[in-house]
């Protein structure tokens, strides 16, 4: 794999810095605020990587979208623009067959249309190298996209299982990159020669709390599955941290604790953006 060292001509930078945006359900508002802080502090990343919602903002950054265009795109998003389920009679018919042959609630066509507002169409069109993580169901392994169709790669990385139908690329079916790679640190370090990686990490809510407090809540198979998957993702992330430490790459993890956003709470996106930006400015300035 080709490795890049891309420092803008005439710019004095003592170390090569990459930025990673982790997965996090509808975390793109907070990621965009973090990106705005990075730019305000005049940090010049030489490459970006992201998974799921983080893939969207990583692509925005790598393709050269300015903060005004990013805010305009995100703050104008409405649920009906991407909420495109199958007709109710199709869902009902699948339900009578215990959902056999039914791969996801949303078709993903609306999501793909929104992504077309990103200026680059292919990875090769981006101003800086970019890595996007996805999960390949067909080959049963994680995949990192660094070339080819950018919009398809982002769509695949953001295809949350059960919510979105899998995305087909070159004969393989893909779902959310965050399933196997919450934060593609190693992928970025493999792609680009780096000294430091700054990661905006959106923690999974039920992993950050230790102890048996979760047992006090009424459990369901969904809660058990969700917790188990998040534990696996967290441990995989920690193994990447250890690996990069042995390679001499410094990782700076930043958690901004922005308020959560969901499809029915898009009005909280602006608050998440501003909270993340303010927290990132303070944390990174202190560093």
Image: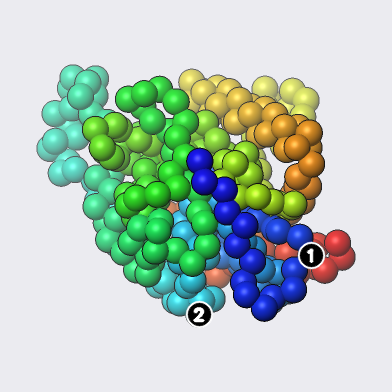
- How does the figure colour the protein chain or chains? rainbow
Q: How crowded is mark 2: few (under 14 residues within 10 Å), some or many (20 or more)?
A: few
- Vertical position of residue 65 compared to residue 181: above or below: below
- Return the x and y of residue 284 as percentages of the image width and height: 79, 64
Camera sees residue 24: no
From the viewer's perspective, is the residue at label 2 or at label 1 nearer?
1
Q: Is residue 141 left or right of residue 280?
A: left
- Return the x and y of residue 214 as percentages of the image width and height: 67, 27
The disc at residue 14 is 1
Q: Residue at x 38, y 36 (%)?
A: 175
Q: Which residue is drawn at 52% across and 23% down?
A: 225
Q: In this view, does 60 lie to the left or right of 287?
A: left
Q: Name the residue nearer the viewer: 281 or 45.
A: 45
Quadrant of the rendered structure where residue 13 is? bottom right
Q: Counting residues from the N terminus, which is met first, the one under dot 2 or under dot 1?
A: 1
Q: What residue is shown with label 2? A: 68
Secondary structure beneath dot 2 equals: helix
What is the tally of numbered marks visible in this picture? Answer: 2
Q: Residue at x 73, y 64 (%)?
A: 280
């Amino acid at each position: 794999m080709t490795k890049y060292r891309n420092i803008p001509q005439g710019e004095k930078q003592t170390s090569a810095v990459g930025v990673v945006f982790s997965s996090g359900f509808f975390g793109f508002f907070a990621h965009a605020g973090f990106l705005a802080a990075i730019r305000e502090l005049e940090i010049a990343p030489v490459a970006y990587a992201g998974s799921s919602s983080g893939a969207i903002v990583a692509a925005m950054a790598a393709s050269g979208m300015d903060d005004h265009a990013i805010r305009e795109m995100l703050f104008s998003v409405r649920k009906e623009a991407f909420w495109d389920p199958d007709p109710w009679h199709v869902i009902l018919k699948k339900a009578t067959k215990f959902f056999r042959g039914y791969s996801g609630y949303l078709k993903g066509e609306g999501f793909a249309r929104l992504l077309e507002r990103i200026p680059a169409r292919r990875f090769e069109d981006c101003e800086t190298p970019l890595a996007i993580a996805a999960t390949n169901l067909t080959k049963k392994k994680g995949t990192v996209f660094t070339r080819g169709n950018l919009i398809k790669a982002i769509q695949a990385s953001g295809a949350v299982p059960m919510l979105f139908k899998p995305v087909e690329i070159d004969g393989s079916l893909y779902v959310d990159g965050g399933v196997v790679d919450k934060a593609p640190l190693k992928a970025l370090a493999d792609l680009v020669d780096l000294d430091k990686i700054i990661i905006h990490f959106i923690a999974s809510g039920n992993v950050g709390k230790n102890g048996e407090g979760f047992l006090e809540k009424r459990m369901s198979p969904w809660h058990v599955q969700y917790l188990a998957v998040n534990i696996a993702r967290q441990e995989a992330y920690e193994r990447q941290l250890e690996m990069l430490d042995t390679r001499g790459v410094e990782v700076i993890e930043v958690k901004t604790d922005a308020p959560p956003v969901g499809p029915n709470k898009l009005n909280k996106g602006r608050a998440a953006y501003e909270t993340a930006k303010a927290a990132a400015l303070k944390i990174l300035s202190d560093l």
